[in-house]
């Protein structure tokens, strides 16, 4: 799967283990590196749901995912759609081969 980033800062955080550890802590940084490796080898976003990683679509925004990073953080991503969906259309995750990583948030614990 292709992965894009919403900002240079997020790209740096995701591509540098040192930066990720400093900003997220060691556990969340290790989880982030693992999830990025998972994303890069998958054919489609549908495979993410099959991996048992507790990944959920955002019920308020079509095409948006929340990917847990350990106990403290979540990676927010959205499907890069080839065309706009009709208001009543269901997103077919098996047809999504690109994700845009938007941000990393602290979980509400």
Image: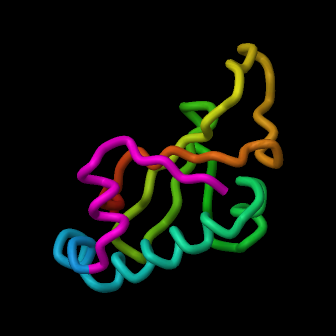
Q: List x then y, in percent, for residue 83.
A: 71, 21
- Count the labels in the image: 0
**In what quadrant of the picture does the N terminus appear?**
bottom right
Q: In the figure, is residue 56 to the left or right of 36?
A: right
State the colouring used for the structure image: rainbow
**In what quadrant of the picture does the C terminus appear?**
bottom left
Residue drawn at the location 44% of the way across and 78% of the way down: 31
User: Residue 7 or 61: which is nearer the viewer?
Assistant: 7
Position of residue 42 relative to residue 46, above or below, is below
Position of residue 20 relative to residue 75, above or below, is below
Q: List x then y, in percent, for residue 2.
A: 61, 53
Q: In the figure, is residue 23 to the left or right of 31?
A: left
Residue drawn at the location 36% of the way across and 68% of the way down: 15
Magenta stretch contains residue 14: yes
Read off the magenta span. 1-17
Q: List x then y, in percent, for residue 51.
A: 72, 72
């Amino acid at each position: 799967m292709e992965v894009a980033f919403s900002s240079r800062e997020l790209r740096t955080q995701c591509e540098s283990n040192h930066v990720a550890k400093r900003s997220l802590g060691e556990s969340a940084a290790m989880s982030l590196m693992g999830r990025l490796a998972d994303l890069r080898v998958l054919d489609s976003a549908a495979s993410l749901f099959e991996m048992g990683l507790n990944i959920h679509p955002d019920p308020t925004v079509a095409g948006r995912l929340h990917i847990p990073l350990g106990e403290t953080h979540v990676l927010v991503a959205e499907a890069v759609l080839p065309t706009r969906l009709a208001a009543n259309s269901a997103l077919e995750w098996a047809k999504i081969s690109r994700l845009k990583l938007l941000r990393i948030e602290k979980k509400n614990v």
